[in-house]
Image: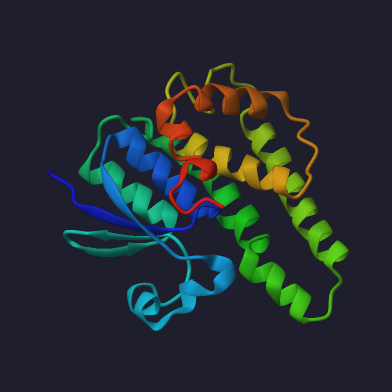
Amino acid sequence: MRFNVLLHGYFRSTASYRVRIALNLKGIGYAGAFRHLRRNEQNAPDYLALNPQGLLPTLETPEGVLTQSLAICDYLEEVHPEPPLLPGDPFERARVRAFAQVIACDIHPIQNLKILARLRALGIADDDVNAWAHTTISEGLAACAALIAERNTPFCFGDTPGLADICLVPQLVNARRFGVDLTWPRLMAIEQHCLTLEAFAAASPERQADAE
């Protein structure tokens, strides 16, 4: 299947970062469209027509529009199965998805820009808002480290990168942004392995056309 896809993202968006990594790992070329979150471009009428949530990323494909980073990754896995992002065994697939969802469902949504802005709008001081994000990220990453503590592989769940690594690396970038003390050696080692791969390095925020 030949791809001609357009990825709407923002260089600092960790959800967009996940999809960039997935596309790169799959060897799928894509064009980029940029929505500056701090300028509220995600709420422009033309973008809301594509993504009614006003969130990033959005992927325009020949078949139509997809939203939500994990759903996009699942789609890419199904239509372009090599190299795989998920293991073949059903139980192991579930474990990888559980790890990914700790980040994509439990850490990221309650420390992203939209939620932090709402906290500030309620009159909560910046220091307390940042502490909220710091605690959320720290607790979530501690859980991630525990979920793979018994494994001794270069990547989260094996000898090749997959969905768990795609979620982990962007979240570690966010952790640093909020001053989280990264005290999990295994997570740090996995990140270093990932960043030796061009698929991850090319997806990094500083290498995006809209980077500031």
Residue 38 location in percent, x, y?
Answer: 59, 68
Q: Residue at x 50, y 52 (%)?
A: 11
In the image, is 195 to the left or to the right of 21? right
Q: Residue at x 33, y 30 (%)?
A: 88
168 is higher (above) or lower (below) than 156: below
User: How are the residues colored?
Assistant: rainbow
Residue 173 location in percent, x, y?
Answer: 63, 42
101 is higher (above) or lower (below) than 129: above
Residue 179: quadrant of the picture: top right
Q: Quadrant of the N terminus?
A: top left
Residue 102 location in percent, x, y?
Answer: 60, 48
Q: Residue at x 32, y 62 (%)?
A: 66
Q: How many marks?
A: 0
195 is higher (above) or lower (below) than 79: above
Residue 34: quadrant of the picture: bottom left
In the image, is 152 to the left or to the right of 47? right
Question: Which residue sits furthest left?
Answer: 1
Is residue 149 something that shows in the picture?
Answer: no
Asked whether 141 or 209 is in front, the reply is: 209
Q: Residue at x 63, y 34 (%)?
A: 147
Residue 62 location in percent, x, y?
Answer: 16, 59
Is residue 142 something that shows in the picture?
Answer: yes
Asked whether 84 or 178 is in front, the reply is: 178
56 is higher (above) or lower (below) than 28: below
Asked whether 192 or 44 is in front, the reply is: 44
